[in-house]
Image: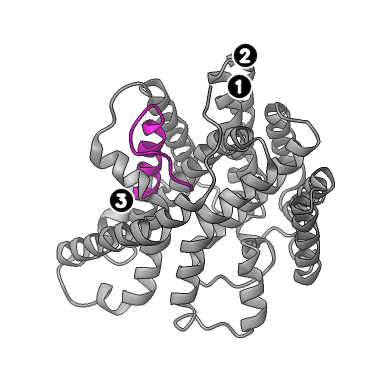
Amino acid sequence: MSAAPEHGRMAWLDALRAVAVLLVVYAHLTRYVFTDVRAVTGEWLHAGPAGVMLFFLVSGYIIPASLERHGDVRRFWTGRARRLLPLYLAVVVVLLPVAWPADPLRTLTGHATMLPFLLDVPLITPVLWTLSYEMAFYLLVSGLFTVGLRRVEAAVAVLLAGLAVATAPLTSSLVPLPVAVLVLTAGFAAVYLRRIRLGGIVLGLLAVALLLLNQDPAHAWDGLLIVAVMFTGTTLYRAERGQIRWRQAGLTAAVVAAALLWNWLAELRALDGFTPGYIARSMITLLVVAGTFAVAFRWRHRRVPAWLARTGVLSYSIYLVHYAAIQLLQPWLTADLPDVVVAAGYVAMVLGVSALTYRWIELPAQRRAAPAPAVR
């Protein structure tokens, strides 16, 4: 959920991030205010999953291109660490006293890997689950890059979609935390000691193992498909760049979308929720994700409204800050005040704090990163 420049030809991606983060904020905030509105919209749109799936599509579109622009796995990981870790760690530190874990050492170790959700580690704040999948995607992309497989994303997306349908629901917690930490450390050590091919293979295999063997029960049905969605984003990037045919990209997107819908419906059956209403909501949610991305892509050369682009630039801060605010301010959110007052105060606070965290935490770390070669 990384940020792109506020202006220029990539502004449409900022607009998509803005839509994604607003959907997620809406999904979480309306648990406390405007619950009657949530009851109506929740019948036809699963706003939270729609938002995070948009985030995943955008990440898939950008991240492999970023790795290729860096041209070096070490520089890529250094850039990712500077981009994501400072705010991530700041939020964990702020919330640690509020969500003090039963096993602090295990919890902190798991969070330090940025893979806690795939390591059966209780999350300090619930929204960090998406970053575990982002991290797994980065590991896979690094592995593919180091062995020279740089334009196979369509095949990988289709393979993951097929595996997801064939294996769901997946098991969890078969790779212990100490083993994962050891392998992750060894992989990064090899990368930074210039044994890049070996390190990339180790990191990629770790990601595969975690995705197949360590899915959290909450995503046992669609965990592999989340990564398939990200690789679909990469496939769309390849097509836009003329590196593959649009027919191939479209077929890949269709296969992944069909697999995602199939598994969502299979999960409904398993939960005795296979009703016309829930079926329609799953289909509409998928259409909203695909349609929003398609509309933004179609109009990608148009000027993006400044407020939307700015919200997209702040989206990583907003994403992490908004739920931390809910955890810290929950008594106020449930106070006997008009919903409009509570919502307005909450949104103003989240935007204000996010602007500050972007200015004083995100930007300084990004400016220290070595610039990547220009895109040609």
Q: Are dots 1 and 2 in contact, CB under 8 Å?
A: yes
Please, is residue 174 above or below residue 374 in the view? below
Residue at left 64%, top 84%? 103
| Sequence-wise first label, 3 or 2 | 3
| Residue 236 shown in magenta | no
35 to the left or right of 88: left
Local crowd at mark 1 within 10 Å, few (<14), some, or many (≥20)?
many
Helix, strand or loop at label 3? It is: helix
Q: How far apart are marks 1 and 2 (CA)?
A: 7 Å
| Residue 120 spot, x, y in % from top left | 68, 68
Q: Which of 316 and 193 is in front in this view?
A: 193
Residue at left 52%, top 38%? 57
207 to the left or right of 227: right
Report which residue position mark 3 lands on.
40
Please, is residue 239 above or below residue 349 in the view? above
Name the mark nearer the viewer: 1 or 3. Answer: 1
Q: Which of 154 and 4 is in front in this view?
A: 4
Task: Please name the amino acid that badge 2 sits on.
Answer: Arg
Report which residue position mark 2 lands on.
245
Task: Please name the amino acid that badge 1 sits on.
Answer: Ala
| Residue 179 spot, x, y in % from top left | 81, 67
